[in-house]
Amino acid sequence: MSAPQPHLETLPRSVQLVLVLGLLALAAFPFFGSEFYQQMVTRMMILAIFAMSLDLLQGVTGLVSLGHAAFFGLGGYALALASSDSAAVSLWWSMPLAVAAAGLAALIIGFFVVRTRGIYFIMVTMAFAQMLFYLVFDNKEIKLFGDAALKLGGSDGVYIYFKPDAGFVDLENKRTFYYFVLACLLVVYAFLRRVLWSPFGRALAGIRVNEHRMRAVGYGSFGYKLTAFTLAGALAGLAGYLWGAQTGFVNPELMGFHMSAHAIMMVILGGMGNFAGAIVGAFAFEFMLELFKDLPTVGDFRIGKHWQLWMGLFIVGVVVFAPRGLLGLLSRLGARKGSGHE
Amino acid sequence: MSEVLLSARNLTKKFGGLAAVNEVSVELWQGRIHCVIGPNGAGKSTLTNLLSGDLPPTSGVITLGRHDITRASPEQISRKGLGRSYQKTNIFPSFTVWENIRLAAQSRAAQQPWNPWRWLGRAASNRAVNERAEHALELAGLAARRHEIAGAASHGEQRQLEIAMTLATAPRVLLLDEPLAGMGVAEAESMVGLLLRLKAQHAMMLVEHDIDAIFTLADHLTVMVNGVVIASGEPEAIRADRGVQAAYLGEEH
């Protein structure tokens, strides 16, 4: 029996170098890229935050959630509901509100779902997310008391007319918003890397590898999994909030099955369990998606229209040839090159 | 002075109509090794699983120190001072030997997963945890294997790691399920030496097949057949018991 491959948790030099270069490229991008591409990269960074939040569950704890978009969508809807049609809402309370709302929903849903394992966990997370999806999809508004009502917009979604007001910086400026999202990305990454090596993070990794043994040495795994689920939901809520702020529009699709599935693919594509992989995966996924969508029409066959097919093949290829994702592939190439010098 | 640390009275575990463990009582004393022997299917591992909380008993009472742990979960029982090893090696194969033991030792630090300070500290730099893990690593004779990936270690080393992880939780009661299984002669000898060194500080229950090791180690011997205790007492008295010889020991010689 060959030894199981450890997760890529400690990032090798080659990967660190690529990450630093990537960061420099992101920091410089607004000075070179057109506004269209600047918007696209902003969207990629937001999805990277979303993918990292899922990686805490999927890569670190070993919980594959097929309903993670529910919390992403909730963050977006929290902004939509907090916003008014006539003036910008303050970032300083609406963003914490969105994060807290998504976190609270994750705490409640997590209380039920983290008791299950494997395929059952996948199914119940999907079921809860579909419940939230249809709650929003089927209701234009939900009456609370008196005249107060949650204007959910039903299947049409809700428009957000102003970007949140951050006070000293103007988020309506697209370049400023770009850097704000980049800052959020860095803070979330630094936080999650810290969590990875904390007593809490080590325990989550232990639960992924052998939950039974963790319980036998005295860990109450339920509390750990519930906390991870809540934290992941809260961070997904942050990503959803930023998405709502950027696009100025939220609709039920944000909570939908496709959104959840895309996040899973991003994490697998980049390489699980180290958060850097989730970022790389999110960028690679969105990049390939744009590439495939732009494929030309040959004769009567519109190649680009069937982008999902090409994306599927691409993901299968990565999984077959780079089982530890793009980052794993990169670190393997780096290691080979390094040993060649000796 | 010696005292009873764990006692189980009239433990029964039924799977459907089959009583895998039937009205079994055991007492584990500090400073004594209690060996449980019997043919395959006698209910030895089921008994271990009942005591550690891996299985709930159908009836009977288990007390650990002053606590009733009959319905407690494995993690609660572990935190009250009972450590167990598994017959089938049960480790974290993709972690290093050190991380396996460190993680077990960390379970005795404050857990509180919901506490944000526990998300931000660095696990590897907790001195109390590292010292406890280091102690267990050296006791089990694994110091040279520290950086090895546990899944790549030899079978004997993985068995030592099982014990080291159990010790890292600083238990007072040790349940060891066939710690010598599949070990070579030299490895088995060093394991027997380790168990003798641990004896004074712990109450120990040992499920084992190796007759030589049993008579070297046992202060008290219980023989189980088909879920029932057929004899229990001093090893020499058991060895002389004709019923036991017929039921079990005879097969071995």
Image: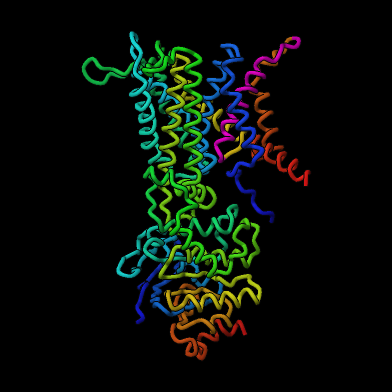
Instruction: Give me the residue at 47% from left, 12% from top.
Output: A173
Q: In screen coordinates, is A111 left or right of B160?
A: left
Q: Position of residue A325 (x, y in %)?
A: 64, 36
Instruction: Give me the residue at 34% from left, 18% from top.
Output: A90
Nearer to the camera, B42 or A133 = A133
Q: In screen coordinates, is A136 left or right of B163?
A: left
Instruction: Give me the residue at 61% from left, 48% from top.
Output: A6
Q: In screen coordinates, is A226 left or right of A57?
A: left
Nearer to the camera, B197 or B120 = B120
Can residue A115 be seen at all in this image of the molecule? Answer: no
Can residue B38 be seen at all in this image of the molecule? Answer: yes
| A62 in relation to A212, above or below | above
Nearer to the camera, A35 or A282 = A35
Q: Position of residue A212 (x, y in %)?
A: 49, 55
For the image, the number of numbered tags is 0
Q: Which residues are magenta?
A: A273-299
The prevailing secondary structure element of the residues shown in magenta is helix
Q: Position of residue A245 (x, y in %)?
A: 44, 17
Q: Position of residue B197 (x, y in %)?
A: 50, 77
Report the quarter where the C terminus of chain B lies: bottom right
| Magenta stretch holds residue A290 | yes
| Magenta stretch holds residue A300 | no
| B252 in relation to B130, above or below | below
